[in-house]
Amino acid sequence: MNLRSRPEEMGFPSHARVVEVGPRDGLQSEPEFVPTEEKFALVNSLIDAGIRHLEVTSFVSPRAVPQMRDASEVLSGIDRTRGAVLTALVPNARGAERAIEAAVDAMVVFMSASESHNRKNVNRSRQESLAGFGEVCRTAETSGTAVYGGIATAFGCPFEGDVPVEDVVDIARRYRDMGITMVSLGDTTGMATPPLVRERCRALRAAVPEIDVALHFHNTRGAGLVCVYAGLLEGVTRYESSIGGLGGCPFAPKATGNICTEDLVYMLDECGVETDVDLGKLIAVARRTEATIGRTLPGQLMKAGPRLELHAMAAAATANG
Amino acid sequence: MNLRSRPEEMGFPSHARVVEVGPRDGLQSEPEFVPTEEKFALVNSLIDAGIRHLEVTSFVSPRAVPQMRDASEVLSGIDRTRGAVLTALVPNARGAERAIEAAVDAMVVFMSASESHNRKNVNRSRQESLAGFGEVCRTAETSGTAVYGGIATAFGCPFEGDVPVEDVVDIARRYRDMGITMVSLGDTTGMATPPLVRERCRALRAAVPEIDVALHFHNTRGAGLVCVYAGLLEGVTRYESSIGGLGGCPFAPKATGNICTEDLVYMLDECGVETDVDLGKLIAVARRTEATIGRTLPGQLMKAGPRLELHAMAAAATANG
């Protein structure tokens, strides 16, 4: 029963790019420093599984985020022979210089769509953030490095609640005016819903059609993959996720953060959306990551196994409707 | 930004019924007996939250499923003044008699779409199951009690793998011929995918249009709510779920079972699909259920809180893209 080959019947695109953000967004919230060698191993095993887009680190202040203090070193240990595109967050021109020295393929500037979250997160107004990015873009241009733009709280703000779609569109326009061609909408605290995904994707397509949109969902309220479904129906082909569901939500200690890469790839596979990722290898990476981190991660597929991994009749259930 | 009022723009129905199966399907896999008074409290608090369809117990052999040994008693303690429709599983005519004595509103017969799972689960061939249901239906008819039909492994079998859609349709036809008007497709071990949901819903609509279809998904591979999304797009308006995500998967001890009622209601609410359930009360029930069960349940919303529950700026994140 091969239903996998007809994504267009579902209204889905035929291909999607899975962008792994676990090494950055996932590890960032880990209190224990993960040794640099383990970061190499994680990223390289993801590349070996077929992932070709990875956000690998963040050139922020080592004091602010000690987990990312080895940013330059991390880049030096990654397998660059297989065409993987490596990106890193940069908060300012100094970060951009470090990122260029470390030879990232693209640097990611980021700000929040809501004023209060931007102030809380980076201690600047949105206008100040945008002004700083101009400098980052000029620095990047000198080295020919691409710049991507992240928009956090794009589907809602934990301090302000609903975020006007116009604010998201305005930032995307400003990004476009700086020469940025790829914009990621971040669902920072898991507030995205299918209608919001639909609305925001359509608004961006109408206002800045030249921008390539990525979607970055969190599963904090259980709707992460549902929002991917909504994104696929809008034709979006780039999704950010974290191996094993690594990472959390600063506002809900027990809740999950990023959607899980292997659960995402499983869903895309089953819907016939080609990702060129080896799901078996990905599950193995997720299980190793869980062992490295030393606690249960939210990913489901690594616990249940692939869909057609059959069980012997000896493994039993009792009268179950 | 009220996007909630336009489910038809998403291709969704305007209303959906949420069928709570936690007291039966969820508790069934709990090794510790849950006191009957706590079962009353659970069901009654769900009714108070607005749930009007509940599968509350199972008239199986108390030896086979000790957790359900208080089936008749459970029915006696439930608030029946608010129009809640109470159903219970019945495996055979003896169970049907007990269910009628306990005054269930509907009894649910169940079998698996795959031969090996049916044998493993109820120790009968599929033909033997169907033959027995004829007797159940005749017993039910004498008391005017409705009979619903469950089809387990409707999206895949842990022993056989893919399950032909024809086998699901054949059982639905046999159910229809017995006078059953409501059929639930059970995703027993979390093998449902959007294309399978689409295919099976369409096949049933074509073959047995007079049958009302319910969908019962498990989140074992993270795709539970994604399959609800696919079901909504097919116009299905009845979904079975379990408060807090209570229940597990017998083949994957660490994986989750049933989709979670409050996460489902949250998603439906956000998509503008009316359920007439009070989400705040539901979250409170989920949290109490978690406390009663004494371990963390998979539901996300009860950890993160409602979408627009705002946080003070003092609760902080660090530089997070």
Image (tube, coloured by chain):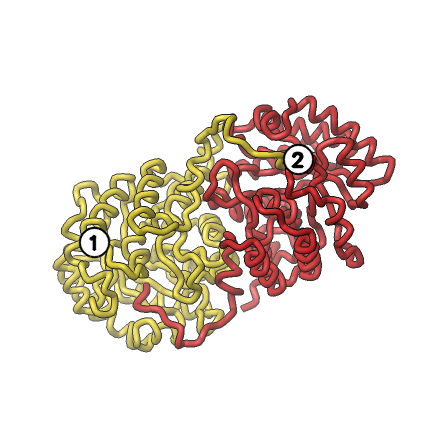
Chain colours: A yellow, B red
Between B71 and A95, the residue placed more toward the observer is: B71
In the rendered view, tell whether residue B170 sits above or below residue A103: above
Q: Quadrant of the N terminus of chain B?
A: bottom right
Question: Dot 2: what SS?
Answer: loop
* Horizontal arrangement in the rendering, residue A304 relative to residue B128 (left or right): left
A215 in relation to B143, above or below: below
Instruction: Give whichever of B140, B318 is nearer the camera.
Output: B140
Same chain? Circles 2 and 1: no
Nearest to the observer: residue A47 or residue A211: A47
Question: As drawn, is B173 to the left or to the right of A316?
Answer: right
- x and y, in percent, of residue B22 in the image: 62, 49
Corner quadrant of residue A258: bottom left
Q: Chain of mark 2?
A: B
Residue kind at label 2, given as amino acid type: Arg
Tag of residue B106: none
Q: Is residue B210 left or right of residue B163?
A: right
Toward the right, the furthest residue is B142
Residue A147 is at least partly visible in this image = no
Residue type at the position of mark 1? Pro
Q: Please tell me which residue is depicted at 39% across the width and 76% down the height of the picture.
A: B314
Position of residue B139 measured from the top left corner of the image (x, y, whole percent): 83, 33
Q: Which residue is mark 2?
A: B63
Residue B66 at least partly seen: yes
Placement of A15 over or under B47, stated as above or below: above
**Quick one: quadrant of the C terminus of chain B?**
bottom left
Kindly indicate the quadrant of the structure image that contains residue B184: top right
Q: Dot 1, crowdedness within 10 Å: few (<14), some or many (≥20)?
A: few
Location of mark 1 (residue): A35
- Horizontal and vertical percent position of residue A256: 42, 56
Residue B179 location, x and y as percent? Answer: 79, 33
